[in-house]
Image: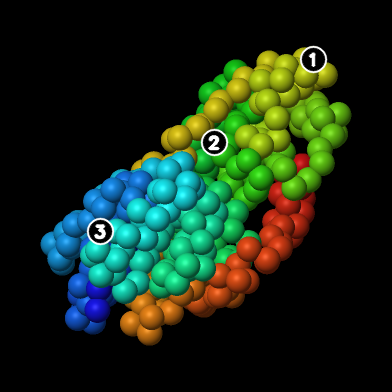
Amino acid sequence: MRIAILTSGGDAPGMNAAIRAVVRSAIYNGIEVYGIYEGYDGLIDAKFEKMIESSVADIIQRGGTILRTSRSERFMTEDGFEKAINSLKIFEIDVLIVLGGDGTLRGAKKLKETGVNVIAVPCSIDNDLAYTDFTIGFMTAVKTVTEAVSNIRDTTESHGRANVVEVMGRSCGDIALYSGVSSGAESIIIPEKEFNINEIAEKALIGKNRGKKHHIILMAEGRGSAFDFAEEFEKLTGIDTKVTVLGYLQRGGAPSIFDRILASQMGYKAVEEACHLHSCAIGTSDGHIRAMSFSDIFEVEKIFRDDLLEILKTVSI
């Protein structure tokens, strides 16, 4: 039996840990495993390399992906897609394992519909795949934002300022929500909920009047311009307000313990399903690693954690 693995789309901390788990679990089970470099582009160009135990030595703690990644426009064309399928046939791949986010999984579903055995492992710092409780990389991004906010608060408090911290999340506000709770932010602005700038300003002024020297606002990038919000907020409150855009800082760094364990579990489960020639998406539900049908994963509605938002509102007064 022969399997191949690739990473596609945006990189996420923990991808290397998942690659390691797949490669070593496959070898343990007597399966040949090939790495495909540069995502779906590499699949089209047949950038295959046989992997052995030492291929994944000392990578569990590394961010990024040793297989590199890409966002492939060619894969969306008929010619590129056919070349991708031909590459799998040439290398006699029985199962393809793909690591990535929403776009990557949709590409995997398309391959599955043409008869390719595909297993998808969710890797996204946004945590925007509704079928799984957590995606690989999300908790590391939350840790990165939390640590950055701690540093920002030191200087914000020293100068008596407010700071609007823009974090990633175009359609999903989980990074802002979870890091808002863990960092003690006063307010968050996210795609899932409407916000009232007057209420946020009032909260900041009440805090200032009782002697509070800082106000941290986390804003998901999909909610508008952090600079426009900061300008309006400063006009309303008279509080000197700065903007910090964390950007790609959130993608990098060593994966957290949570993500290393989750990636190892999901990589192991992917090979377990591959042994049975199953096509599926790996996910986590109520603390358990599960395999789900591709026909189901895009139909699941994302459940917003209102309980966490209520906690944030309550403890940030």
Residue annotated with mark 3: 35
Tell me residue 186's x, y (percent). 70, 38
Amino acid carrying mark 2 in the image: Val
In the structure shown, which secondary structural element does the residue marked by tag 1 occupy? helix
Q: Residue at x 33, y 50 (%)?
A: 44
Q: Which residue is mark 2?
A: 149
The disc placed on residue 235 is 1
Please tell me which residue is depicted at 68% across the width and 25% down the height of the picture: 225
Which-is-in-front pick, marks 3 and 2? 3
Front residue of 178 and 311? 178
**Mark sitting earlier along the chain (1/3):** 3
Distance in Å between CA atoms under marks 1 and 2? 23 Å
Identify which residue is drawn at 46% across, 63% down: 111
Question: Residue 77 — which label?
Answer: none
Residue 28, x across and y down, in percent: 21, 79
Taking depth in this image into account, of 148 and 62 the one nearest to the observer is 62
Mark 1–mark 3 Cα distance, whole angstroms, equals 54 Å
Q: Nearer the viewer, mark 1 or mark 3?
A: 3
Q: Picture coordinates of residue 168 (x, y %)?
A: 57, 39
Q: Residue 221's x, y, as percent?
A: 63, 35
How crowded pointer 2 is (Cα within 10 Å; few <14, some 14-19, many 20+) is rated as: many
Alpha-carbon span between mark 3 and mark 2: 37 Å
- The residue sitting at 60% across, 31% down in the picture is 165
Q: Establish if 233 lies above or below 193.
A: above
The amino acid sitting under disc 1 is: Lys
Give the structural element (helix, strand or loop) at label 2. helix
For badge 3, the amino acid type reads: Gly
